[in-house]
Image: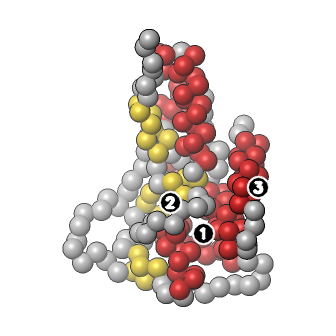
């Protein structure tokens, strides 16, 4: 039996439930908790930030479609369109605005500090993924823009901090994503 295999690569994925160290949004959340500034190495670096539901949906879609048509197996990039590739500082400003908007008048001090890497390790200033093959092959297009990706991510962390039922909350976010697919 021949099983088709695809290689799928996603951009910088953001979404609720990520508490890893040295990741932009989780570091912002920790900064709010500790009242310490987020340390930023390169605020001008651009990254293909996207909400986690974007690649999950595309991975499932491609898996289903390539089982129906094994010729679709291949390598695909899943990321935002080029105009939605944002700088780290853009995401920080978005995070701050959305976080304080979600807190409904209970604004919290959010700060960041630029500290260049002392080892001077090379870090690309521009990272982007060419999603055209995925778009052309499957008729897919990104569903949530950068603002919406940050907003949905921040909403998850607010729900988490407020003690919400996260299962129900995540189901509602999945339904919102599904409803936004055009």
User: Camera-side residue: 138 or 18?
Assistant: 18
Residues at marks 2 and 3, CA–CA distance in whole angstroms:
30 Å
The crowd level at tag 3 (other Cα within 10 Å; few <14, some 14-19, many 20+) is few
Residue at the farthest top position:
1
As drawn, the label of residue 94 is 1
Q: Mark 2 or 3, which is nearer the eye?
A: 3
Q: Which residue is mark 3?
A: 168
The answer to whether 147 appears left or right of 180 in the picture is left
Q: Which quarter of the rendering shows the C terminus?
A: top right
Instruction: Measure how far apart labels 1 and 2 are at the Cα level.
Output: 10 Å
Label 1 CA crowd tier, 10 Å (few <14, some 14–19, many 20+): some
Which numbered disc, 1 or 2, marks the residue that appears first in the sequence? 2
Taking depth in this image into account, of 167 and 12 the one nearest to the observer is 167
Q: Residue at x 43, y 14 (%)?
A: 2
Q: Is residue 49 above or below residue 5?
A: below
How far across and down, in percent of the image, does residue 157 sit? 64, 68
Please provide percent x and percent y for residue 114: 39, 80
On residue 86, which mark appears?
2
Residue shown at the point (68%, 74%) measured from the top left: 161
**Image marks 1 and 2: residues in contact by CB distance under 8 Å:** yes
Q: Secondary structure at mark 1?
A: helix
The mark that comes first in sequence, 1 or 3, is 1
Q: Quadrant of residue 3?
A: top left
Task: Indicate which disc residue 54 carries.
Answer: none
């Amino acid at each position: 039996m021949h099983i088709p295999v695809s290689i799928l690569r996603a951009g910088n994925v953001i979404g609720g439930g990520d508490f890893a160290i040295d990741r932009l949004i989780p570091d912002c959340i920790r900064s709010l908790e500790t009242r310490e500034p987020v340390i930023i190495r390169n605020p001008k670096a651009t990254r293909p930030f996207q909400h986690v539901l974007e690649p999950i949906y595309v991975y499932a879609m491609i898996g289903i479609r390539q089982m129906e048509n094994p010729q679709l197996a291949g390598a695909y990039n899943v990321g935002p369109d080029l105009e939605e590739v944002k700088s780290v500082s853009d995401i920080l400003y978005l995070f701050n605005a959305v976080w304080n908007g979600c807190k409904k008048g209970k604004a919290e001090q959010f700060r960041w500090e630029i500290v260049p890497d002392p080892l001077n390790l090379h870090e690309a200033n521009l990272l982007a993924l060419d999603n055209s093959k995925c778009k052309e092959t499957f008729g897919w297009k990104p569903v949530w823009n950068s603002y919406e990706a940050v907003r949905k991510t921040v909403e998850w962390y607010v729900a988490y901090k407020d003690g919400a039922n996260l299962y129900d909350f995540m189901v509602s976010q999945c339904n919102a994503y599904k409803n936004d697919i055009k």
